[in-house]
Structures are given as C-alpha cells and as structure tokens.
Image: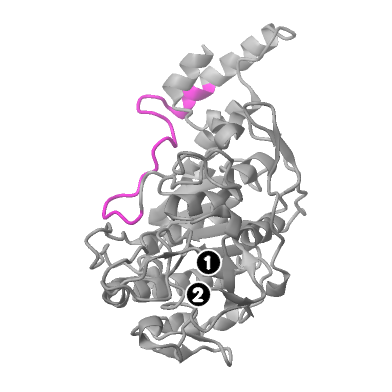
Amino acid sequence: MQAGLLGTAGLCLADLLRLEARASAKIVRGARAPSVIILWMRGGPSQLDMWDPKPDAPAEIRGLFQPIQTKVPGVYLSELLPKSAAIMDRWSLVRSAAHRTQDGNVGHSDGDQICFTGYVAGRDPDQNIMPSCGSHVAKQLQQRDPSLPAYVMIPRQVPGTGAAWLGKAFQPFETVADPADNRPFVIPNLGLVQGVSEALLKDRVQLLHALDKYHAGEAGQLIDKHQASALNILTSRRALDAFDFDRESAATKDRYGLEPGFEPHDPQRCGAPNWAQRMLLARRLVEAGVRLVTVDVRWWDFHKQAFDSQRRGFLPRWDQAYTALIEDLDERGLLDSTMVVAWGEIGRTPIINKDAGRDHWPYVMSVAMAGGGIKGGRVVGSSDRKGSAPADNPKIVHDVLATMYRHLGIDINQNNLDYNGRPHAVLSDGSPIDELF
C-alpha cells in the first residue's frame, strides 16, 4: 500500500526529502533565513572584457571595449556594462581569484567540480566524486519553509552539482521546465497526478496512519516524516505557489529581459537561452524560502569572434538581467539575506588569439558578489597589468565557497563518510573573504 500511495499520488519529492538531515544552524524566529543564488556563467567569462579592463595594456590584451567609470570612484568596468556601473555601490568584485596551481591545467568540467565541491575532479570530470555545495546545504540545513526543497537547479544539473556519495536524497531539485522557453511554465513532479483528488489522497493517508497505529511497535512505518513532508508539498500549495512563474507581472519579466535566446558568432558554441528569466525565477524561489538556487547562465566560452558575440548579445543582456536581480532583491528587502555569486569555472587568456577570441585561463578570474552582508563598491585584490595573474591579495576559488558556506551557516568541518567509509570534510581548504564585509 505504501508503494501504491507513492505511485498513484505522484510523490516524486519523497526520495529527495527522506534522508534530509536536521539543521545544524539555528534560525532566529521572525528573521529571514540566509539564501544564496549562484549565477553559473559556464564557459568562463572574460575578466578583461567585463570586470577587470586593462586600458593601458597593448591592443592584443586590452581588446576592443573601453572602460567606463562606475558609481564608485576609481572603479572601472567594460563600456558594455553601464547599468552595472551605475549600481556599483550595491555589489562588489574579487579580481584576484584563481585555481590552485596544484590542481593542474583546469578546463571546463574540472573547473566545474572544483568550484562547486572544493575538490578536484575524478577520472570523469562530468561526474561528481565529491558532493556539491548545494548537496551539503540540503543535508545540513533545515528549510525555513519545510514545504520547499533546500537546493534547486534552474533548469537542470550542470557538471559538479551532484550529491555523489551523500546519496540521491541530496541531489538538487531540477525545475526541468525552463522559464526561458516560450511556453507555459509548468514544473513536473509537483502536484497530484491526473485522477487523484486531494480528497482521495486524504483518505489514503488516513488509512495509512490507521494501519501505522494498528501495527505500532512493529518494524518500520508505512508513512515516514519525509513522505509526510512530500504530502505537505502536495496539499499546502506552498511549493506550487513558489514555482508559479506566471504570478510574476509582465512588467517584472520585461525588467529582467524578455528577448529570446541568441546565437554567438562562434559556431562551436551553442546558443544562449534567455537566462534573464531564469534569474527572475531564482529571486522568486529565495523569496519563498529556498536556501540555495543555482542558475545555469551559459555559455561564455568565446574562442572565436569574442567581441562581436559579447557586444551583440551577451554583455548588454547580462547587464540588464544582473542589475534587475540585484535591484529587485534590494527593493523587496531580500538582499541582506540573499548572497548572489556570479562566476564561471575559469577566466580567459590575456592574449587575444588569431580568431579574435580568448582561450581558457585558470590562473586568474573575477567574481561578482553581492548581498548577504557584503558591502557594495568594494574591489578585493587585483590582477597584474596584463590580467594574467593575481597581483595582490590572491584568492583561491575555495575562498568563494567558504564565504557562501559561512553566510548559510554550514559547518565546513563536518565529516561525511564516502562509499568506502572514509571521512571527508565539507571543505578542507579556503577561508571567507572578509574584505567584502
């Protein structure tokens, strides 16, 4: 009867909730629980063409874009980021982030793994051998609203975001549906399957509770607390409301950007969807109480015609969506409790290649960070005059993870056992970036 209940009621969240651990962080009653939005710029955004321009460098380094003054004196950004420059007092930059030299020649999937887990990749860098930051969040934190998953991916997992040996219960909840698509936004696996009414579900639950009482003292229960949480999701409508993207007004959607996806000039790269609407959904989810939302904001791997692609679509659209998110969170009183981390797995080469693009460069990268107590208008560290390596105050990507973990109240020293019974700390390297606060 347990299997029948799950099969006919469509309780697809039960597995996700079944093994979820109790919170290690205490939540102050009446205060908003901390959340994080990761804007994952997969492919590797160019530090020189966005956040760390080098106007005095030779032409083969500085590129085609001119720097512009931001609202913060002495801080400059690319000319294609005027909206970001205008609200620089609300967000900050780390310009000296890099991968550790002992982690080797880091590429896309290797970088994904390190940035999401804090550990190097295995033989197959597309598959997690260590749990992602989101999976640790799901394991350690009790949700502010127990009817919502703690860890959400929009729309699907990217390399590095899995739970590895923590188990399937700590995988991200994937929206699957994509608000970037020009179609009705409906989340699969939420709600009752066709033909099962709430009244019928209630009858089945009451029957199971009655059987549990009858068999009290025997091994196991027909319905456990995780199934009960899944039932709450189905019957309370909290999750349905949180994921109901149609509740956002046309004006708000337009503020983030409604233009359809676009194709970069590099024929090797896939087109970019309208990830602006994905950012809006992320805001909606943290407002409802989701603790960590990772947004797939790809694809920044410009080996060819980088300047045409960035000028034509990527940077203006990024500028509009990113600033809309920061301003929207601020206006709704969510920015203090919501940390927004925008970054990719690698930087780009300082020297422009023969195809007018930039190649992979793990030796320095910029990270944009806002909210969660971060002071706006700060620049942590710097790169050298070529934008090729940290010049002062170097940071490793693990420091970004440590900063997010501290904000969320994650115990980074907690040990979890892998499949072989070996203990692993949540994060064994890195320190919070205190200069941001």
Residue 324 located left or right of residue 145: left
Mark 1 closeness class: few <14, some 14–19, many ≥20 residues within 10 Å: many
Which type of secondary structure does the marked residue at label 2 adopt? loop
**Which dot marks residue 363?**
1
Height in image: 285 above or below 415?
A: below
Q: Nearer the viewer, residue 352 or 223?
A: 352
Q: Is residue 240 magenta?
A: no
Q: Main secondary structure of the magenta part?
A: loop
Give the image quarter of residue 150.
top right
Q: Quadrant of the C terminus?
A: bottom right
Height in image: 312 above or below 1?
A: below
**Residue 176 appears in view:** yes
Q: How many numbered discs, if any?
A: 2
List x then y, in percent, for residue 184. Answer: 30, 49
The disc labelled 2 sits on which kind of residue? Answer: Ser
**Which residue matches tag 2?**
388
**Which dot marks residue 146?**
none
- In 3D space, how far apart are the residues under numbered discs 1 and 2 (Cα atoms)? 7 Å
Which type of secondary structure does the marked residue at label 1 adopt? loop
Q: Nearer the viewer, residue 186 or 49?
A: 49
The disc labelled 1 sits on which kind of residue? Answer: Tyr
Give the mark nearest the N terminus, 1 or 2: 1
Residue 22 located left or right of residue 38: right
The residue sitting at 37% across, 64% down in the picture is: 300
Q: Which residues are magenta?
A: 179-202
List x then y, in percent, for residue 107. Answer: 44, 55
